[in-house]
Image (cartoon, rainbow, N blue to C red):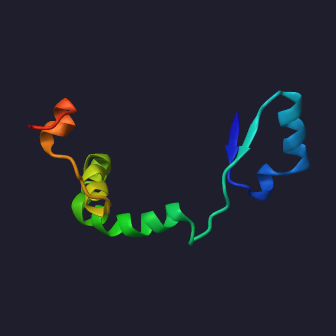
Amino acid sequence: MLINNNESQFLSTILQQVCYTLDIAQILTPVYHPANQVERKNIDLKPGLTILVGDDHDSWSEKLPRIRFALNPSQITLDILQHIYNSDAN
């Protein structure tokens, strides 16, 4: 499987023929567009992640849940017992 980003070198006739001959499936990723939802979330995510990570660039994956939690606009409507036991306290 070959995953590519729609760059011209990946769309060439020669590469298409090679993939066909070798039975390699090609998957094209969406073209970058600054207004799409993923790019918009990345714009929100980057400043907080930059602050939390600081100089320890290897720790970004550990910090990501905190940033996601801070950016999540949904509210929790169940109390803790409902989450743990799937029932009300009453």
Which residue is located at x 89 percent, y 44 percent? 14
Q: Is residue 86 left or right of residue 57?
A: left
Which residue is located at x 86 percent, y 51 percent? 12
Camera-side residue of 57 and 82: 82
View extreme (top): residue: 22
View extreme (left): residue: 90
Vertical comparison of 27 with 86: above or below: below
Which residue is located at x 32 percent, y 63 percent? 73
Q: Quadrant of the N terminus?
A: top right
View extreme (front): residue: 90
Which residue is located at x 15 percent, y 37 percent? 88
Q: To which quarter of the image does residue 16 belong?
A: top right
Camera-side residue of 34 and 10: 34
Camera-side residue of 86 and 65: 86
Q: Is residue 9 left or right of residue 47?
A: right
Q: Is residue 34 left or right of residue 52?
A: right
Q: Quadrant of the C terminus?
A: top left
Vertical comparison of 49 with 3: above or below: below
Q: To which quarter of the image does residue 55 belong?
A: bottom left
Q: Position of residue 37 (x, y in %)?
A: 52, 64
Q: Position of residue 63 (x, y in %)?
A: 26, 52
Total count of labels: 0
Q: Position of residue 48 (x, y in %)?
A: 28, 66
